[in-house]
Image: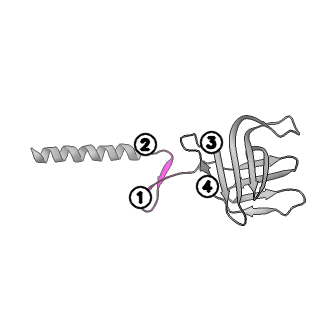
Amino acid sequence: MKNLIVYVLLLGVATTLLVNNRSIANESVNKNNFIVAQAASNEEFIARGTEPFWNVTVSKRGIVYNSPGTQQVKFPYVAPLKAEGRPADLVRVYRLKGTGNNTLIIQKVSACSDGMSDKNYPYSAIFIQGNKILEGCAEKK
């Protein structure tokens, strides 16, 4: 009787593992057999603001800040922090590595206006560069 119970338990565990492995759609298994969540396929954004004019381009190749009359600043790509308990597309916070304390915050909104055109953007953007705060809008590339 004990052997039958052990076999039934093992069969249940094996079935559960098989079902779980087939249902992992957006995850992959790394070389250590740990399940690793894959990043969103489109993490490319362009954030821009007016007065002063500025833009930040986000891609897997890097994060680049531009503003007329200043030197372009390049940062290595970092995965964004996401708001706990919220959809991944709602808020992205990029803590940029390099010199200074730089942060880019992209938040999904119903509409964001750049104040210069009639275009509405689906995201608002805040770029914090040291003690300077720039506000604008963003969209996926």
Q: Is residue 42 visible?
A: no
| Residue type, label 1 | Asn
With 140 as the anchor, is 53 left or right in this view?
A: right
Which residue was labeled with disc 1? 33
- Position in image of residue 15 (x %, y %): 30, 44
Name which quarter of the figure residue 94 lies in: bottom right
Disc with the residue nearer the chain's start (2 vs 3): 2
- Position in image of residue 68 (x %, y %): 89, 57
- Of marks 3 and 1, the one in the foreground: 3
Observer-nearest residue: 43 or 73?
73
With 54 as the anchor, is 124 left or right in this view?
A: left
Which residue was labeled with disc 2? 23
Q: How is the image coloured?
A: one colour
Which secondary structure lies at badge 1? loop
Q: Which residues are magenta?
A: 24-38
Which secondary structure lies at badge 3? loop
With 100 as the anchor, is 84 left or right in this view?
A: left
Mark 1–mark 2 Cα distance, whole angstroms, equals 16 Å
Which residue was labeled with disc 4? 79
Q: Residue at x 72, y 64 (%)?
A: 100
Mark 1–mark 4 Cα distance, whole angstroms, equals 22 Å
| Residue type, label 4 | Ala
Disc with the residue nearer the chain's start (3 vs 4): 4
